[in-house]
Amino acid sequence: MRTRPQTPAGTYEGTITAKAENAPELKLKLKVKVWNYTIPEKWNFETMGQTCWGNVSGYYGSLSKEMKRKYIDFLLDHRFSPTEQYLDKLSPDIEDIPYCLERGMSTIYLSGTYKGDSKSLKSRHDQVKALGGDALSKSLIYIGDETDKW
């Protein structure tokens, strides 16, 4: 259950009705306590994300833009950057980065497994830099932490 940030603190009670085509409706009593603080929209905790978008797509059959946005929202609601750590690619995708930054994301991968391809890395750097603001300052290059190929 979520409330809007401007909801006054207090305990709220009510009834919700659940309906299904093949079952009688069900009335449920609901009691929600709203605390007297607001969780910040943006945060400064750096997270190392590992969202396997291929697995997410596999689960849904295909991943529509709408479903991907819902998944991104779910991750960001829980302060988890929707990044894919172990691929040599820009993550999140360039079209998702502005929205993710607006929502508070703190980490952009220019590469999840940098292996020395400076041309593609420079291209990703330039894409993020072109977004302006502080996007580039949130970028990193993950070179691996368990490798013998230094």
Image (cartoon, rainbow, N blue to C red):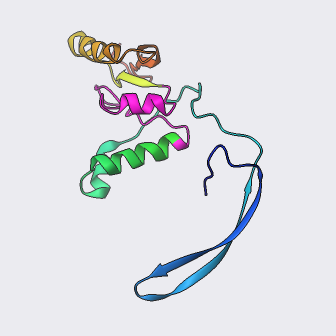
Magenta-colored stretch includes residue 104 = yes
Using the image as rendered, state which of residue 87 and residue 68 is in the foreground: 68
Give the percent coordinates (x, y) of residue 107.
46, 25
Residue 95 showing in the rendered view: yes
Query: As drawn, is 49 to the left or to the right of 86?
Result: right
Identify the residue at horizontal 42%, vertical 18% (top origin). 135
Give the percent coordinates (x, y) of residue 115.
28, 17
Quadrant of the image containing the C terminus = top left
Magenta-colored stretch includes residue 27 = no
**Relative to residue 38, is residue 33 depicted above or below?**
below
Give the percent coordinates (x, y) of residue 76.
50, 39
Using the image as rendered, state which of residue 81 and residue 48 is in the foreground: 81
Residue 146 showing in the rendered view: no
Query: As drawn, is 51 to the left or to the right of 44?
Result: left
For the record, the magenta segment spans: 77-106
Quadrant in the picture for residue 117: top left
Query: As drawn, is 83 to the left or to the right of 17?
Result: left
Quadrant in the picture for residue 122: top left
**Relative to residue 38, is residue 7 depicted above or below?**
below
Identify the residue at horizontal 34%, vertical 46% (top origin). 68
Prevailing SS of the magenta stretch? loop
Query: As drawn, is 12 to the left or to the right of 92?
Result: right
